[in-house]
Image (tube, rainbow, N blue to C red):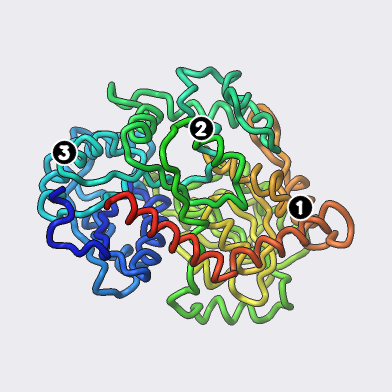
């Protein structure tokens, strides 16, 4: 029980070790902030290139410390690239191989720190076997919706085909998720592919889940009860809940250029459209997207990013737009590439609708800022998040897409936006608006959200004592 020496029984010490992607790092940061506010000591591991951004998001607290870790060299992986934001999908897979070479380094850190618990992501399948002999508990923190873990990375899935992945796995609960489209199922094949001769994503997930002491889900029974019950049955081990990890208000003031532009428009009239830093649309779909937004007649901000490499992103954006489009929408539409103050833009009084990729954090931000949701999922967990929100919770609308290739038209996009902005006095817009308000109130209820963390800390203490 060396992990508890030098630490009082009441003060938990936790190591956070997320995968090197900001879609994973951010929920680990949010959880760290909430645990520290409940008196838990946090040691946060990440590569040097990620630390500035992590330190900006972590609360200033004597309980939180960032520890840099070194990514070992792997043939074909350029040095100094410390997150997937700068990598192609093939290089991101090589980063998983580099992660596997970190075992001696991580073992040394754990021996030195002597934490009670280490929170790990999906990729560190080797870590429980290092932590357990040291008397350290391992918790697998899943940053995806429970629906995703229940449907895709399910222990009953073994070398599935596209047809297999179009159907739920055996025992899957009866919900709005009854089948998936062909293009979605094709995308779900990725986690089952071997990575450079090593374990696939799904093999990593199953090894972590079976060998960890507890599974921790970024979810709650109110929003995902059937899927959480199903996961409890599948793994027969503690499934602890963080709740949705509602972010606090942004730490920064909205830049003057955005403030000046937004304040020209009436309350809730602007559509904000963004797909995050690592979700990309092809040029033909960018054209349909922006033409669909123009067709709504509403003012809009579109943020589009592009895969790493291949030239300047501003040029890529210009080339993707229909001829004459930027001039035509001047004054009413803004086209941007690169990082933006998403939280502060969504919080602005003029913004009332959010067209997004259905990333879980983005969906939560839409609810708490009272922005109606139009979902245009592009990959993986986003497809299931979108079904969860539009189907189970009936609190947003999903853009209609072609079953085979997932393409949508400008008319599909315009129709979806109008359901939640103009047609709110008739169905389905009326019910969506009511449900959106209900879930917003739930997420903004400080007592409810705080209670998730209180309960989690109590469970953590029980498990280490």
Q: Label 2 belongs to which residue?
A: 233
Task: Determine whether 64 is above or below 277 in the image.
Answer: below
| Sequence-first disc among 1 and 3 | 3
Badge 3 element: helix
**Numbered mark located on residue 133 in the image:** 3
Tell me the CA gap for discs 2 and 1.
42 Å
Residue at horizontal 45 percent and vertical 54 percent from the top: 313
How many residues crowd mark 2 within 10 Å: few (<14), some (14–19), many (20+)?
few
Residue at horizontal 29 percent and vertical 74 percent from the top: 61
Question: Depth check: 201 or 252 in front?
Answer: 201
How many residues crowd mark 1 within 10 Å: few (<14), some (14–19), many (20+)?
many
Is residue 318 found left or right of 110 in the rendered image?
Answer: right
Q: Which image quarter: residue 447?
A: bottom right
Is residue 269 found left or right of 287 in the rendered image?
Answer: right
Q: Are marks 2 and 3 in contact (CB under 8 Å)?
A: no
Q: Position of residue 337 (x, y in %)?
A: 49, 59
Residue at horizontal 76 percent and vertical 52 percent from the top: 414
| Sequence-first disc among 2 and 3 | 3
Badge 2 element: helix
Task: Determine whether 128 is above or below 446 in the image.
Answer: above
Q: Label 1 belongs to which residue?
A: 414
Tell me the CA gap for discs 2 and 3.
27 Å
């Amino acid at each position: 029980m060396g992990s508890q020496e030098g630490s009082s029984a009441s003060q938990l010490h936790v190591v956070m070790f997320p995968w090197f992607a900001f879609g994973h790092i951010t929920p680990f940061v949010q959880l760290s902030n909430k645990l520290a506010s409940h008196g838990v000591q946090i040691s946060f591991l990440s590569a040097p290139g990620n630390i500035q951004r992590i330190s900006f998001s972590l609360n200033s607290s004597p309980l939180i410390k960032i520890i840099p870790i070194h990514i070992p060299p792997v043939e074909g992986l350029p040095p100094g690239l410390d997150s997937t934001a700068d990598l192609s999908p093939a290089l991101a897979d090589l980063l998983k191989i580099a992660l596997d070479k970190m075992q001696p380094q991580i073992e040394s850190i754990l021996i030195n720190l002597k934490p009670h618990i280490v929170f790990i992501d999906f990729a560190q399948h080797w870590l429980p076997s290092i932590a357990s002999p040291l008397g350290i508990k391992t918790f697998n923190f899943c940053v995806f919706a429970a629906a995703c873990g229940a449907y895709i990375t399910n222990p009953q899935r073994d070398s599935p085909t596209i047809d297999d992945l179009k159907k739920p796995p055996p025992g899957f609960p009866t919900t709005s998720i009854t089948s998936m489209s062909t293009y979605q199922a094709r995308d779900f094949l990725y986690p089952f592919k071997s990575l450079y001769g090593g374990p696939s994503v799904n093999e990593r997930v199953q090894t972590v889940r079976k060998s960890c002491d507890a599974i921790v889900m970024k979810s709650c029974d109110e929003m995902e009860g059937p899927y959480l019950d199903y996961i409890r049955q599948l793994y027969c081990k503690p499934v602890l809940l963080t709740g949705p990890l509602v972010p606090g208000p942004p730490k920064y003031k909205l830049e003057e250029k955005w403030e000046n532009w937004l304040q020209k428009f009436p309350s809730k009239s602007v559509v904000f459209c963004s797909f995050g830093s690592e979700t990309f649309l092809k040029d033909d779909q960018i054209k349909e997207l922006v033409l669909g937004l123009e067709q709504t007649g509403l003012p809009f901000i579109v943020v589009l990013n592009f895969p790493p490499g291949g030239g300047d992103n501003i040029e890529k954006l210009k080339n993707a737009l229909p001829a004459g489009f930027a001039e035509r929408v001047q004054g009413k539409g803004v086209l941007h590439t690169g990082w933006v103050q998403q939280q502060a833009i969504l919080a602005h009084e003029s913004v009332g609708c959010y067209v997004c990729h259905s990333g879980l954090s983005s969906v939560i931000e839409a609810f708490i800022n009272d922005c109606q949701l139009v979902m245009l999922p592009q990959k993986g967990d986003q497809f299931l998040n979108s079904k969860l929100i539009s189907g189970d919770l009936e609190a947003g609308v999903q853009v209609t897409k072609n079953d085979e290739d997932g393409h949508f038209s400008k008319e599909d996009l315009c129709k979806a936006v109008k359901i939640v902005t103009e047609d709110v006095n008739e169905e389905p817009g009326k019910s969506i608006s009511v449900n959106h308000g209900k879930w917003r109130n739930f997420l903004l209820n400080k007592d409810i959200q705080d209670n998730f963390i209180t309960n989690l800390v109590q469970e953590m203490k029980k498990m280490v004592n």
